[in-house]
Image (tube, grey):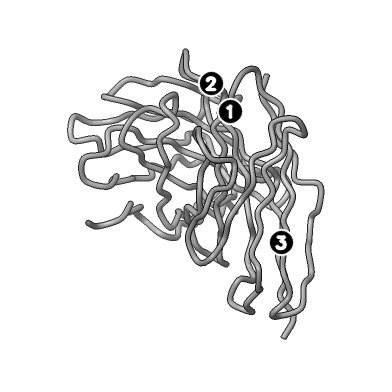
């Protein structure tokens, strides 16, 4: 089975722009979670989608949004980029929602640099 | 609120020696516990998890972890360290069934295996 794929792998943007990141989960997985990883803050949970519905959300401003499509693929969008948004954005998929203790499988991440 | 602590930012161990990476947690009820490993510029890879049952959990690459309810710990261990084990290790916890609680990750422990 193919693993979790994320596109693009690297992205350079300037402040004020917006960006869309994409995640394709493992076939059959219905849950997709997004995380932001930075050296200072570690892994911070952004949101989880299950069956096209946002099930949980972390403490991030409204500039961060996401969605999930009927084929379980997910996108996250960051508007009005700030320098502090530079990070590795990780997507993880699992069979069921996080509430079931299902194992999350991570993609390689998208490295976003905001100049 | 649930939380997880990895008290050591870095652990150094000589190749061939046993290794331990510490993790303690705080959660209401019985937890789900996970260990992940991250190599440079990569996503997280699942190592093992505790849901219920035997307190000693065996995982990938010869790693194991022991669930200790009284000490609220879930330390990662390996009998004989390899240089290739050098990486960043994350412990994660999720509270018991009910609701849609997210998974909370620790801050990570960098393991350095010295040849």
**Which element carries disc 3, helix, strand or loop?**
strand
Front residue of B65 and A77: B65
- Extreme bottom residue here? B115
Residue at point 50%, 35% (across, down): B53
**Chain ID for label 3?**
B
Q: Residues within 10 Å of mark 2 (few under 14, many from 20)?
A: some
Q: Earlier in the sequence, mark 3 or mark 2?
A: 2
Q: Are marks 2 and 1 in contact (CB under 8 Å)?
A: yes
Do callouts 1 and 3 point to residues on the same chain? yes
Q: Which residue is mark 3?
A: B110
Where is residue A58? Give x, y as percent. 56, 26
Front residue of B99 and B17: B17
Residue B31 is tagged as 1
On the rendered image, what quadrant is the N terminus of chain A found in? bottom left
Query: In this rendering, is residue B61 above or below B94?
Result: below
Residue at point 18%, 29% (across, down): A70
Q: Which residue is mark 2?
A: B96
**Chain ID for label 1?**
B
- Extreme top residue here? B99
Query: In this rendering, is residue A66 above or below B49?
Result: above
Report how far apart the C-alphas of labels 1 and 3 lie in the structure: 24 Å
Do callouts 3 and 2 point to residues on the same chain? yes
Where is residue A100? Give x, y as percent. 41, 26
Q: Are marks 1 and 3 in contact (CB under 8 Å)?
A: no
Among the 4 quarters of the image, the one containing residue A65: top left
Judge left or right: residue B56 versus residue B112. left
Q: Residues within 10 Å of mark 3 (few under 14, many from 20)?
A: some
**Which element carries disc 2, helix, strand or loop?**
loop
């Amino acid at each position: 089975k193919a693993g979790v794929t994320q596109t693009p792998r690297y992205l350079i943007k300037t402040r004020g722009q917006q960006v869309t990141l994409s995640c394709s989960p493992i076939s059959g997985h219905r849950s997709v979670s997004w995380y932001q990883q930075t050296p200072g803050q570690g892994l911070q949970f952004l949101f989880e989608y299950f069956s096209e519905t946002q099930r949980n959300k972390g403490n991030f401003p409204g500039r961060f949004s996401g969605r999930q499509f009927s084929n379980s693929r997910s996108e996250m969008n960051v508007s009005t980029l700030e320098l502090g948004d530079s990070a590795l954005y990780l997507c993880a998929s699992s069979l069921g929602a996080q509430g079931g203790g299902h194992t999350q499988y991570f993609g390689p991440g998208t490295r976003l640099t905001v100049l | 609120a649930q939380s997880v602590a990895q008290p050591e930012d870095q652990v150094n161990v000589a190749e061939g020696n046993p290794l331990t990476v510490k993790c303690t947690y705080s959660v209401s009820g019985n937890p789900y516990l996970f260990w992940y490993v991250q190599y440079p510029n990569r996503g997280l890879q699942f190592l093992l998890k505790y849901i219920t049952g035997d307190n000693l959990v065996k995982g990938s690459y010869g790693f194991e972890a022991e669930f200790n309810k009284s000490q609220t710990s879930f330390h990662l261990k390996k009998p004989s360290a390899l240089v290739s084990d050098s990486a960043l290790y994350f412990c994660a916890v999720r509270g018991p069934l009910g609701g849609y609680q997210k998974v909370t990750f620790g801050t990570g422990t960098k393991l350095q295996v010295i040849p």
